[in-house]
Amino acid sequence: MADPTLAQDAGAHTRAATPRPRRTRSPLASVALHGTLGLAVLVALFPIVWVVLSSLKPGYAIQSSEITLFVEPSFDNYVHVLTETSFPRWFLNSAVVAAFTMVIGITMSASAGYAMSRFNFPGRRGLMWVFLVTQMFPVAILIVPIYTIMANLGLIDTKLSLIIAYCTVAVPFCAWMMRGYFDTIPKELDEAAALDGLGPFATFYRVVLPLARPGLAVTAFYTFLTAWGEVAYAIAFIQTDENLTLGAGLQQFVPRFNPQWDSLTAGAVLITVPAALVFFFAQKHLVAGLTAGGTKG
Amino acid sequence: MSTSTSSSVTFSGATRIYPGSDRPAVDALDLHIEAGEFLVLVGPSGCGKSTSLRMLAGLEEVDAGQILIGDRDVTHLRPKDRDIAMVFQNYALYPHMTVAENMGFALKIAGVDKATVRKQVEEAAAILDLADYLDRKPKALSGGQRQRVAMGRAIVRQPSVFCMDEPLSNLDAKLRVSTRTQIASLQRRLGTTTVYVTHDQVEAMTMGDRVAVLKDGLLQQVDTPLGLYEKPANAFVAGFIGSPAMNLGTFSVVDGHARIGDGLVPLPRSTVEAVGAAGQVQVGFRPEALLPASEGDPGSFAVQALVVEELGSDAFLYGDLVGDDLRADHVVVRLPPRGVPQKGETVWFTVEPGGLHAFDVETGAALPTH
């Protein structure tokens, strides 16, 4: 029979014999660790904090060589940007483009990903390769041919041209991602649904999609961001001020000889708000273990 | 719960060849299952038993032949149009639905009104002892409960055929035994034609009205459990059915006797005639068909004990044949639990009358033993 007190004694003994339990850290190591972490936090936060602080200063104080945290803090820059520039117009354009990119992107990449995950059709492998290969070309190479296509279609200077261009960037990647996610959902669920009387589309919509919520959330966030902050296509395709999106429009605040840092910083802060909101809603769906319990083995 | 209209199932030359493979996974399966019958498909992994079941369910294409449910040709119908329900090995419950929603899903899809669905789900839940769990999600259930939900989902629909694909293989040993009897008695009660796939020959023997043994996509034999046990059609079935397995070995035929170790075991005249000039025969005898004998008894042979397992109710002796002509693996003998031989001891046995099976050395087909 094992004697519990004896076992406890033995435990206490081993603990006493160890010179330093794992929990404690030498003061030096502690300082080094926290110092490194603190530095990393600073590096990450500084630009954002600085932009926010600058957006509250008057223009001359931002450009001043004297480094200050607060100089006459006010929301004047925001008022200016929102009332006396085309910023609200650009904001709306960006929101429309990003929203459509997101909706179209999710629809296309989820259905394409499902097809690649579940169905065996001629050219399946080829299609998957094409999706990968398209990711290898940088924007700089694609921008001219896509411009030509848009011009031939008469889409230059329209939001639709941007939505299509952003989808070409986001959909192949997201389709791959969704395929990977669908692969983790057991095929037996589709088969059970087929036996329960669902067709392929209903199976996708009622059984598979609800379980792919985390994948959809990532896709939503990715497609939104792709469109929201994009500059290169926007500058190339959009020619009139009223059709500009945020990324391209903001550049008007920084002409070569007279940058308006006050407007730019206020605009930059405003731009992050919708992105943060989308992230906030998306991350709620980033939960693990949605398929838990459905199958075993 | 009202009894469903049960149907017979007929496989007629049903063949499935997977793309990229030359060998059929299921090769011209001919099998008729009566309405209300519980048929077990059993065989080693890769024998085509699951494929056969999935062909019946419509989850696998049929490359040749036909499958009938009742007198309806369902060969190329979609799964949902076949009026079958399936219990999957891993249950395949919808994780985002509650137990009640899982069980009532098919009815809901079929457009049955909510009150009826609820009523049928509750009836099934009562049968399966799930009434307290109807509002839970599958992940909040134990393995045994999930298995019962999967059963419930199948019976709520009152289909004409149940397909069950190793539904017990994910349960622990004890639960498996109790669930086994529950499923069998539930099937008797509902009277629904059931095709049940398993690799476990004990499940096959205990549950099925009839058992179909498959190997390499070919149907070996269909019979009642006892029929398979007593009259295996070939050496494969003989070795597969029964636990511990039948002792099988190839021995030379000398003067109407099989030379087993040092012993000469008399063969029936019909067997000797069937062996003919081949000079060799595959002989099988079950562990319980051996009777203790003494040295020198006619027809006796010697076994040297390697291991003796005492199970309380029985004892099993694992040993080697003694003699020159050693062409069998270990010999297993079932003994009464008292007074078992010691390890290393040499013991003599004779085969009890009628306990000898003979098979062709080349084809493995059973030879007459009367």
Image (cartoon, helix red, strand yellow):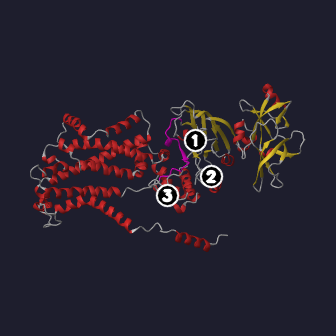
Q: Is residue B145 left or right of residue A102?
A: right
Q: Which mark is residue A161?
A: none
The kind of secondary structure element at disc 3 is helix
| Residue ID at (35%, 39%) | A132
- Mark nearest the camera among 2 and 3 is 3
Residue B76 magenta-highlighted: yes
Which residue position is annotated with label 3? B139
Residue most toward the top?
B277
Assign the magenta stretch its main secondary structure.
loop
The chain identifier of the residue carrying mark 1 reads B
Mark 1 in CB contact with mark 2 (< 8 angstroms): no
Image position of A269 with respect to A137: above or below: below
**Quadrant where the image shows the N terminus of chain A:** bottom right
The chain identifier of the residue carrying mark 3 reads B
* Viewer-side residue, B309 vs B306: B306
Residue B81 magenta-highlighted: yes
Residue most toward the bottom?
A5
Q: Is residue B291 left or right of residue B117?
A: right
Which residue position is annotated with label 2? B183
In the image, residue A142 lies at what x, y percent?
25, 37
The chain identifier of the residue carrying mark 2 reads B
Q: Is residue B21 left or right of residue A112?
A: right
- Look at label 3 and name its amino acid: Lys
Quarter of image, res B252? top right
| Residue ID at (60%, 45%) | B6
* Range of magenta residues: B75-94
The kind of secondary structure element at disc 2 is helix
Say how many tags the image has: 3
Quarter of image, res B352? top right
Q: In the image, are marks 1 and 3 on the same chain?
A: yes
Q: Which mark is residue B50?
A: 1
